Each structure stands twice: as structure tokens, then as C-alpha cells.
Amino acid sequence: MALLPMYPGKVNSPQTELASAIDDEQTTIPLLDASVLPDPPNIATIGTGEDAETILYTGVSGNDLTGVTRGFQGAAKAWSAGQKVARNFTAYDYDALRQNLESHGSE
């Protein structure tokens, strides 16, 4: 079984917000302050609760996340300006850790 990439977290999961509305296909995400998120590549959540969308980003340009894979987990959707964005602990983080430990244990 191949190891899944694991992405660094950020202490206290600081939040920023969408600087403007985005549609469900945008691959550049404008933020108020991209510096609160870990360096790319990494993942972040847009929104909170059951409707959140986890994205994978491969670059940062100023306050824009670039090379974004939408719907990395959860459905890609349109979001309004001001929506919270953070590097929260996700189901992907748990699954990658669990699968990588299981893979390591079976070697």
C-alpha cells in the first residue's frame, strides 16, 4: 500500500476569510491573509460544519491560494466573501495517519 502524503498543521488553526466570492470551479482562492495558513502544498477548509469543503493548494501568491484542487474532500461549491478558511484537522489527516501507520506496521 502506498503511503499517503501528510500535510503540516498549524498551531491553534488560525483562520482567515475569503476576500471575495468564489464559484465552484475557481482554482485561485483570494484570502484576506494567506500568511496564517501553512506553506504549500497543504490543505485547508472553507466553511465549517457539515457543509465545509476541504481544498488542496499547491502555491501561494500574495494572499491568493493557487493551484487549488476543489472538493479534495466534500463537494466543491460557491462561497461568499467573508467565509472562514483555516488549516483544520480533517478526515483526510486522520485517514492518512491511520493508513500510513497500518502500512508501516505491515512491512
Image: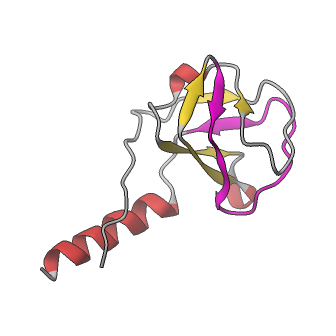
Q: Please provide percent x and percent y for residue 50.
A: 71, 61
Q: Give the range drawn in magenta.
A: 63-86
Near-viewer residue (107 or 52):
107
User: What is the quadrant of the N terminus in the image?
Assistant: bottom left
Q: Please provide percent x and percent y for residue 29.
A: 72, 34
The residue lying at 12 percent from left, 80 percent from top is 107
Residue 94's place in the image compared with 87, above or below, is below
Q: Please provide percent x and percent y for residue 90.
A: 51, 56
**Quadrant of the rendered image containing residue 94:** bottom left
The residue lying at 72 percent from left, 46 percent from top is 47
Residue 38's place in the image compared with 70, above or below, is above
Examine the structure image and report whether residue 71 is included in the region drawn in magenta: yes
Q: Please provide percent x and percent y for residue 37.
A: 51, 30
The residue lying at 62 percent from left, 49 percent from top is 55
Near-viewer residue (6 or 52):
6
Examine the structure image and report whether residue 90 is included in the region drawn in magenta: no
